[in-house]
Image: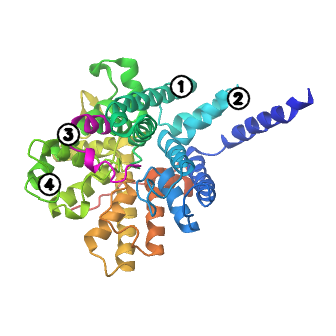
Amino acid sequence: MRSWLPGLRARVNLKARLRHTWRYSPPTILSGGFLLLIAVGTALFATPFASHQGMTFWEALFTATASITVTGMSLVDPASDLTLFGQLLVMVLFHLGGLGLMTFAVLTVMALGGRLGLKGQRVVREAMDQASPGDVMLLVRRVALLALCLEVSGAAVLATVWVPAMGWTEGLWMSFFHAASAFNNAGVSLLPDGLAPWAATPLITLVITGLFITGGLGFTVLTDLWRQRRLSKLSLHSKLTLTGTLILAVGAWLLIMAFEWTNGTTLAAVDSGSRPWLAWFVAVVPRSAGFSVVDMSSLYAPSVLLVMFLIFIGGGSNSTASGIKVSTFMVVVLATRAFLTGRRRPTAFRRTVSLDSVFRAYTVVVLSMLMVMLGCFLLVILEPEMKPMDVLFEGFSAFGTAGLSRGITEDLSKPSQAILMVLMFAGRIGPLALAFSLARPRAVKLRYVEDQVQIG
């Protein structure tokens, strides 16, 4: 009987601690959880079990930050420098960062046989951006089951190519790791040359891009598709996200082919039949996916600016991707169109976008631009000998947790790398959530007389 007491006490204490955390706001819990995981990850990466040659504290900190924020940037080579334990640690961290800390917190409560109170359900619902008062437990189960099914299915398809090429053990491990890395938009590859040799292979391209596009849609959209199963019955948020994703993906694909078709170091490095597949990968990977299939420093200037624009937008809300989010971009476009056409409220799909959504969208865009510009401004000052385009690209990539680089990450000074880590953290948490976790929003009851301000 006494042998069960320590385990029982541990379960009771853990339940009490989880209930205690619900007193804080979702942004505060999210920020604190990420910082805690970065600290734990840094300590584990610094052990001799995580890498073959051992990591310095700075390398461990950068690797932990990049992993939990699902950013593919790294100061070490995951394929050759990390041990199996280190690779497993990277995968655990990008699952926690991609699927969300709240998801795993609720799964922990469920595993312990506990239930969430009303306050706990409210916090999780706000953190997962769910307005409806539905069953949070059911939502989390669906998210976890959906992620598992998609990752296993993707790994099974990848295994049909990589098992014959690499053998059963290595082929299965590579298949599952890359499927999980793609769905979580982590962009970490364990292949010696990354996915570049496979980017023009139709099956590999379709599976990898399909996984990170699906993960980047957002769990709100995926669960909406699960419940409704008909496009006409989807919520306005889902319709805007799906429409925006399609427009951005197809538009970027056509532009990349137009810009890079004759570039001998990118698309023209393969035969004409493979160029559309490679162009598709290059066009959709900036949406926070992070897999590098071409040398980013070899892209023409228009393509670089396009990639930076896509990185800034990112994926869907409540997804494994980062950036300002597709729905935010679509709301800003709709609000701008409404103003230019003389409408008082933006509309789409026979629905009116709420003013609160419009204010939040513009706030996210402004805060994001301020963060990126400040980060890039500091990087340019700290790295005067590097090309400004390379430094700006690095800053945008860190904020969008895209993980793409023009090959300067390891050459940056430690202060510059520290700025990249701050941008990764801010980009993954989200500028609005980060601002709410630092500030104390209060409802203002006093109303003032309206006045006009000249604009433009």
- Name the residue tied to disc 4: 269
Q: Earlier in the sequence, mark 2 or mark 3?
A: 2
Question: Which quarter of the figure has residue 105?
Answer: top right
Q: Label 1 to label 4, Cα distance in Å?
A: 45 Å
- Name the residue tied to disc 2: 112
Amino acid carrying label 2: it is Leu
Amino acid carrying label 3: it is Ile
Secondary structure under the numbered disc 3 in the rendered image: helix
- Name the residue tied to disc 3: 247
- Image depth: mark 1 or mark 3 in front: 1
- Image depth: mark 2 or mark 3 in front: 2
Amino acid carrying label 4: it is Ala
Q: Label 2 to label 4, Cα distance in Å?
A: 54 Å
Secondary structure under the numbered disc 1 in the rendered image: helix
Q: Magenta stretch: give its range.
A: 189-208
Q: Label 2 to label 3, Cα distance in Å?
A: 44 Å
Q: Is residue 206 magenta?
A: yes
Q: Label 1 to label 3, Cα distance in Å?
A: 31 Å
